DNA sequence: TCTACTTGCGCAAACGATTGTTCAGATCGC
DNA sequence: GCGATCTGAACAATCGTTTGCGCAAGTAGA
């Protein structure tokens, strides 16, 4: 691992007394090569004694394969994405790929990010996580014929791995209904996006299945920030005539904002109003009261996206659109039966 | 950006009617080249019309410079590291570098991670974030003569960017003292590590400066998990004869655990016991009561580490060990004057 | 007008691998 | 014993750049 004279195939070949091409066939080549046992042993021996490490650059230049995946995320400090990154990195590593990360400011449209990754760095494929549906981007990637997988959302038939947010929302509402709640509000993300739509469907679906009316005045968009969640909660508190007894929050982040707003208003969680959030992460246990959540497989989403992308790159014709089901509830302290006088 | 026939320097040169070497000198070379204005214009024009993007692989092969930094982190889903990653990515991008990430399981010692990055991927340098001092690793990197920068800790004179945790701890304690507290406990991380030592020094330093005794029974190690923080708080509650009226927690995570334990014990925060934490992130505002924190420049740490590494790579002889001072307090709801009867 | 620079650019050799082709020697059938 | 076949390994081109060197033309000085 000395820097000044990195050992190359040439050194290995010289030591083993063979041509570099022969060394290459043993060390890097496909298995079906005709090489004598004797030479193979000498080459392996030489490679080991010199601590040979192939130069990925040279190999990539020749073969046009970098074994590198480009990962574009809108925010690193969102648990949804950090867990997904971790899953993707692990899965990629298992299959011999590395990950080149790039940040993409969601507000500042900049297709250059993808082009730099694909054109200059020659990544083999792109993992695109984003908060909203970006149809232009998808068209560009398709036109460029570069393998890509969408993460955290699904658009048309483009390859993607997303969460089954509809089921997650349904499960969340069902838990509240099982506790006895009949008036359940929904603090949504953005209603128009892929996940926003799915949550809404799950929320209404669960209510209807229980024979409850779908009341749009109980739904309040909040975006994906703490403050957004708090404001949405305040709006619900002032607007709703009989207050809801429970709330389904789109994400951990908006749930915590909502809880803060309830504290401010002097409303006890869960005694007066229960709160359940979609997604689970360590921070759910850290807020007060600890949040009951619907567990979603964030890490698996990253892993699955990486797997799918690699399958795509390596030429399989894999199933293209995956939706990962939630993996159950983490019942903590923020949900309870409704107050007795609410009936 | 079509895939099948990527445009190379040869294409540009042909279109401009010059040799590839000439095109290279204009497009990639250093500024001080002797080229006619006329040729330069033709080449630039050709490059633009063909949408030429240089192949970083080929360039790297020739120049032995990849303009890529390897970033090794022990956990992606820790706010300390996700913010640092974001800072590092942004700073690197500003200087034309990309970041290749690798996870390194802190429990599973595996030097291979670094070797793969340096040997196979040929990154220009390594950004090493870790939870504990890893002297072997440092020796290896030094021996390999590969530029590296330690993040979030400092060991000897190795290049590093860490937080001035000692000042952070001191500032935290000073805030508590200013509110009138005289009996301040410390929920520490791990006492032996770089940051653990620094926090302890800051904590004792502030107490001594105020003429207060240094009482080791008020210091309780907790590790870096929510549950660790809770257990440490419980131990303090049972052990300390007059209870402390305030607590300095090593991190956001242990602070939330501590608060949970206080809630369980029926102790009101901040009325009976104040809590202040080191580090600041959105979740600080989300716990109840909202945490007062000492703000530390996590994103700047990542950025500064990347900057320093790039300086190192590009041959400057920059100041090697940086300690970033905290940037003040975020005073929220978890600190208040001590109860009147505590004096 | 002749030498001596300067200028602008092309030639060709790298960088470190992969891979199609060639080629010498061994093996085989007859 | 001789041509055909097979085997194992070397030869050489190639991927897309960068860069030392040399060469022709132009310019200047004497």
Image (tube, coloured by chain):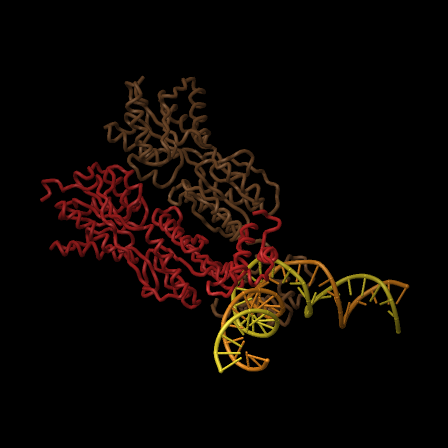
Chain colours: A brown, B red, C orange, D yellow
Quadrant where the image shows the C terminus of chain B: top left
Q: Is residue C21 above or below residue A172?
A: below
**Residue at image point 22% right, 55% down:** B167
Residue A75 or B244: which is nearer the viewer?
A75
Q: Is residue B234 above or below residue A294?
A: below
Q: How many marks?
A: 0
**Residue at image point 26% right, 56% down:** B164
Looking at the image, residue B201 sits to the left or right of residue A92; the answer is left
Where is residue B213 drawn, in percent x and y?
13, 55
Residue A24 quadrant? bottom right
Residue B74 or B279: which is nearer the viewer?
B279
Where is residue A317 drawn, in percent x and y?
61, 41
Residue A177 or B278: which is nearer the viewer?
B278
Looking at the image, residue B85 sits to the left or right of residue D1; the answer is left
Where is residue B171 drawn, in percent x and y?
20, 51
Q: Is residue A29 above or below residue B90?
A: below
**Residue at image point 15% right, 46% down:** B241
Residue A180 visible at all: no
Residue B124 quadrant? bottom left
Residue B65 or D21: which is nearer the viewer?
D21
Where is residue B175 drawn, in percent x and y?
17, 48
Residue A137 visible at all: yes
């Amino acid at each position: 691992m000395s820097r000044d004279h990195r050992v190359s195939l040439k050194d290995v070949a010289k030591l083993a007394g063979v041509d570099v091409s022969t060394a290459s066939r043993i060390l890097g080549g496909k298995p079906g090569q005709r090489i004598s046992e004797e030479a193979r042993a000498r080459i392996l021996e030489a490679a080991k004694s010199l601590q040979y490490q192939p130069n990925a650059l040279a190999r990539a230049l020749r073969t046009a394969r970098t074994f590198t995946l480009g990962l574009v995320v809108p925010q690193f400090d969102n648990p949804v994405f950090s867990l997904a990154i971790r899953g993707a990195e692990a899965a990629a590593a298992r299959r011999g790929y590395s990950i080149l990360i790039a940040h993409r400011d969601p507000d500042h449209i900049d297709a250059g990010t993808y082009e730099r990754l694909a054109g200059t760095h020659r990544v083999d494929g792109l993992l695109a996580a984003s908060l909203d549906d970006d149809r232009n981007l998808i068209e560009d990637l398709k036109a460029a014929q570069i393998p890509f997988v969408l993460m955290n959302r699904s658009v048309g038939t483009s390859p993607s791995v997303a969460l089954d947010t509809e089921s997650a929302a349904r499960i969340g509402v069902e838990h509240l209904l099982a506790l006895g709640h009949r008036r359940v509000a929904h603090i949504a993300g953005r209603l128009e996006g892929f996940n926003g739509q799915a949550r809404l469907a799950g929320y209404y679906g669960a209510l209807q299945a229980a024979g409850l009316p779908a009341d749009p005045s109980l739904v309040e968009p909040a975006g994906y920030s703490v403050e957004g969640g708090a404001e949405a909660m305040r709006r619900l508190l002032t607007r709703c005539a009989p207050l809801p007894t429970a709330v389904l929050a789109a994400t951990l982040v908006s749930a915590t904002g909502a809880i803060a707003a309830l504290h401010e208003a002097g409303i006890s969680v869960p005694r007066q109003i229960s709160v359940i959030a979609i997604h689970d992460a360590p921070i759910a246990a850290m807020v007060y009261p600890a949040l009951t959540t619907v567990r979603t497989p964030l890490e698996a989403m990253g892993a699955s996206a990486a797997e799918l992308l690699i399958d795509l790159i390596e030429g399989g014709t894999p199933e293209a659109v995956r939706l990962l089901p939630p993996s159950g509830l983490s019942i903590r302290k923020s949900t309870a039966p409704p107050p007795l006088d609410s009936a």
